[in-house]
Image: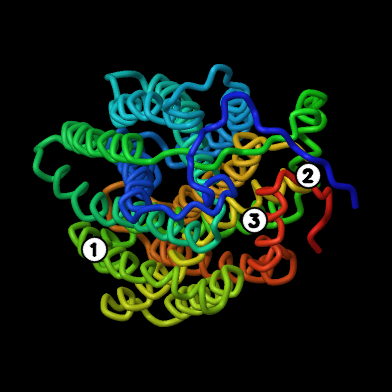
Amino acid sequence: MSTQEGTLPNKSVTTETAASKEGHVKLSWREKICYGFGDFGNGFMFDLGQAYLTKYWIDVCTIPAAAVAGIFAFTKIFDAFMDPIAGSVIDGRKNIGPRGKFRPVMMASAVILAILTVITFTMPDLSPTGKILFAYGAYMAWGLVYSFTNIPYSSLASVMTRDVEERSQMATTRQAGSIGAQLITGMAFVPVVLMFASPHEGFFAASIVMSIIGVIGFAICYFNCHEHVPVKRNTQNEQKAKFSDYIKLVFTNKPLLCIILMTLFTISAMNTNNQMMIFFCQYNLGHMGLQPIVNGIMMGCSVVGILLIPKLVKMFGKKKTAIGGLLIGCAADLLNFVIPTNIYTFIILVTIGYVALAIPNGVTWAFVSDVIDYSEWHNGIRKEGITYAAFNFSRKIAQALAAVVSSGILVLTGYVANAVQSEMTLMGIKAAMTLYPGVALGIAAIILYFFYGLTDDKFKKIADDLNHGKWEHGTIE
């Protein structure tokens, strides 16, 4: 095992305390909370597409469900391949200014993303084929800009601090922001839509309101968070690095590959739940107006649940905390599928399942910051954007999978827009809402248990090496 001394880059962020020079930055609660506002703002634009575009395109724009499944699948896969490009552009930025490497890109992209969010909920008077092509173009553009918004936001956490507890608290505030956005959009979006006689006008107006709030959330993060950690880069290795080295950087990072595989199942489970909720409430429970109520209970409890993340991580560590949440969510979702549909038992079990899933989803953000540092320690090359883009690739594929499951179930079971549904269709909606998430979370727990070896104790050793300019080129088994 070799050790190389790194050198400080010419334009590193400087913080004069000894703690920050070694990466163990203790952040104020103001800064940690404001970091969470980034995902709060993100949710006001991202969650609309995941929860309501399927309904908008199928029922309002009258695009066939099979075509909608194709739109989501293709555009998400396209976005997934755009993420590495976005990561490379961000990593390759020169002349980093006083605002840092990540925040300016994040903020500028967030404004453009808000405009594109509104465009996705706009449909010109076109032919059926024209509507499909417009949906493809608008959502592909949205996804590309989303990469330039979310990758710098997520990478920002890795240069704010290397302290394990601080990162777990930031993961909590980020997840709180995400769930908070889901809570508000889940309760407010449909009522805003229903205020208008025309569904087209309703969806358009609701998207404008949510997008404005989204930009405000990102602005709070931008103005209050800072890149404290002066990264000691192995400049000799980075100067020699080629594209093949970056591929190696990803595929030799075993903890990252594990998180990528786990995320395919956790994110597809969550997005399938969100996409099918409006259908389940309208047809299985009998009234679309129940959707804001169910979402309010489910996501409100999740906000409370994720506040336990720092305490649980301190008691059990990140890995055990995440596995425990996945297993509880798996059991709740499978039970919800097996028992007859009842509004009360459904709400109780879907709430338990969603709260349980929110905890590992929150912990995942701390995992990502850890695997970015592990990648540098293992390969001698630090590329936050590329590493996060590889992780985000799995999220995009998971979103495509959720869209295929949701829209595909509607097609296969004979869904007819705005009509009384058959028993087969109702069972399909229920299966997508409960059975698929239950199975997916069980698989995710197995993956994390057997293949993720980067424990908190092992990471502390890695962080100490990096803080002293060492690249061990080691492995975590």
The percent coordinates of residue 142 (x first, y second) are 43, 28
| Crowdedness near tag 3: few (<14), some (14–19) or many (≥20) residues, C-alpha within 10 Å | many
Q: Is tag 1's residue or tag 3's residue first in the polypeptide sequence?
A: 3
The type of residue carrying mark 1 is: Gly
The percent coordinates of residue 224 (x first, y second) are 33, 40
Q: Is residue 91 left or right of residue 124?
A: right
Task: Choose top left, top right, bottom left or bottom right for residue 463.
Answer: bottom right
The residue beneath circle 1 is 296
Which of these two is toward me, 289 or 29? Answer: 29
The percent coordinates of residue 197 (x first, y second) are 9, 38
Gap between marks 2 and 3, in whole Å? 12 Å
Above or below, comparing residue 258 to residue 470 in the picture? below
The residue beneath circle 2 is 251
Task: Choose top left, top right, bottom left or bottom right for residue 477.
Answer: bottom right
The type of residue carrying mark 3 is: Ile
Q: Is tag 2's residue or tag 3's residue first in the polypeptide sequence?
A: 2
Q: Pointers 2 and 3 in contact (CB under 8 A)?
A: no
| Crowdedness near tag 1: few (<14), some (14–19) or many (≥20) residues, C-alpha within 10 Å | many
Which of these two is toward me, 11 or 407? Answer: 11
At 59% from the left and 51% from the top, the residue drawn is 368
